Image (cartoon, rainbow, N blue to C red):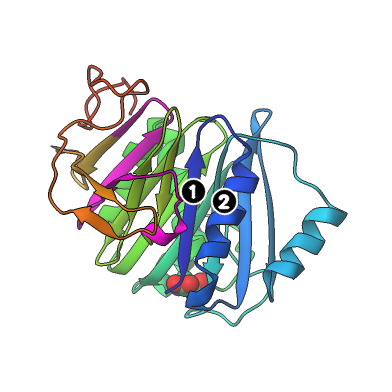
């Protein structure tokens, strides 16, 4: 298991995500990568090796600027370290990007079923199966959070996931089962990470994504449901800037309302229309 960082806000997602991944570097990794939503599409860069390899790739082939993105540092479990196996993983159309910590147990069977349905695999990872499944479900529900819930109901294993879709250019969706995933709340910006140490020091309000929950992040709000779609509370607590909790359980049953005020629908999975 290694690192997930994601961002939705007003700043360069690439800069924010790379800085967050750097803060998780001490956990060790064999590959790293990022994906940002840009101009109705999605752009990604990933390399096995170190951040310097990713930076070199980004200087040779810069990504267009975008304000929503995801990133990952990988410690390989399914498939050896390689550029192809580095995260993010994309679907066939290149409109979905997924990063994952942990293991999806049934990945070989899922990959075989996907291949039988005509999907072309670009890696040997478990994560890529989730990317193709997410794209399949999205193509019938047109709702990334709902597609993620459907995927998670299909998966067994211990995992944390983060995903973006080019058709929802300001949204990040995360999900976890048995591994940590945290939301960091800023002013008009939201962060998702597998460790609070990834958040920039000014992020003081943090919420845990619970077991078997799906979280939807938009710069104006955060919504949580379980895998069945039952809404859950976004319970925030303060951290001291180093990612350490100051006051455990200081509960704030709304999500993040942009200006700080509760907004209709925020905090449960039913608000915000498609969220
Ligand atoms: N199982 C995934 C892979 O091998 C994720 C490993 C990790 O947690 O970094 O790509």
Residue sitting nearer the eye, 96 or 132:
96
At numbered mark 1, what does the secondary structure look like: helix, strand or loop? strand
Residue at x 67%, y 69% (from the top left corner): 84
Q: Is residue 129 magenta?
A: no
Name the spot of residue 95 as percent of width and height, x first: 59, 41
Query: Going 64% across and 64% down the picture, which residue do you hit?
Result: 122
Instruction: Please say if 166 is above or below 214.
Output: above
Circle number at residue 17? 2
Disc 2 from disc 1: Cα separation: 6 Å
Relative horizontal placement of residue 15, taking residue 103 as reference (left or right): right
Q: Is residue 193 above or below residue 169?
A: below
Q: Which residues are magenta?
A: 196-222
Q: Is residue 86 left or right of residue 251?
A: right
Mark closer to the chain start, 2 or 1: 1
Tag 2: Cα neighbours inside 10 Å, few (<14), some, or many (≥20)? many
Tell me the number on the disc at residue 6: 1
Q: Does residue 39 appear to the left or right of 148 in the view shown?
A: right
Marks 2 and 1 close (CB-CB < 8 Å): yes
């Amino acid at each position: 298991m290694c690192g997930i960082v994601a961002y939705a806000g007003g700043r360069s997602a690439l800069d924010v995500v790379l800085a967050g991944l750097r803060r998780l570097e001490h956990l060790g990794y064999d590959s790293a990568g990022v994906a940002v939503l840009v101009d109705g599409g999605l752009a990604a860069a990933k390399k096995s090796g170190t951040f310097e390899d990713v930076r070199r790739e980004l200087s040779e082939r810069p990504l267009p600027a975008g304000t929503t993105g995801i990133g990952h540092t990988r410690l390989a479990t399914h498939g050896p370290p390689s550029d192809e196996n580095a995260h993010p993983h994309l679907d066939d159309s290149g409109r979905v990007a997924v990063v994952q910590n942990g293991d999806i147990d049934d990945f070989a069977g899922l990959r075989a079923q996907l291949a039988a349905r005509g999907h072309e695999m670009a890696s040997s990872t478990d994560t890529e199966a989730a990317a193709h499944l997410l794209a399949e479900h999205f193509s019938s529900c047109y709702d990334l959070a709902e597609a993620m819930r459907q995927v998670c109901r299909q998966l067994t294993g211990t995992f944390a996931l983060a995903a973006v879709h080019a058709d929802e250019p300001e949204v990040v969706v995360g999900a976890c089962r048995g591994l940590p995933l945290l939301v960091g709340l800023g002013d008009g910006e939201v962060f998702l990470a597998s460790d609070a140490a990834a958040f920039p020091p000014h992020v003081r309000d943090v919420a845990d994504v619970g077991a078997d929950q799906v979280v939807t992040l938009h710069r104006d709000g955060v919504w949580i449901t379980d895998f069945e779609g039952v809404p859950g509370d976004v319970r925030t607590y303060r951290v001291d800037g180093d990612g350490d909790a100051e006051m455990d359980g200081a509960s704030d049953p709304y999500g993040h309302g942009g200006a700080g005020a509760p907004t209709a629908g925020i905090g449960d999975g039913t608000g915000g229309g498609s969220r």
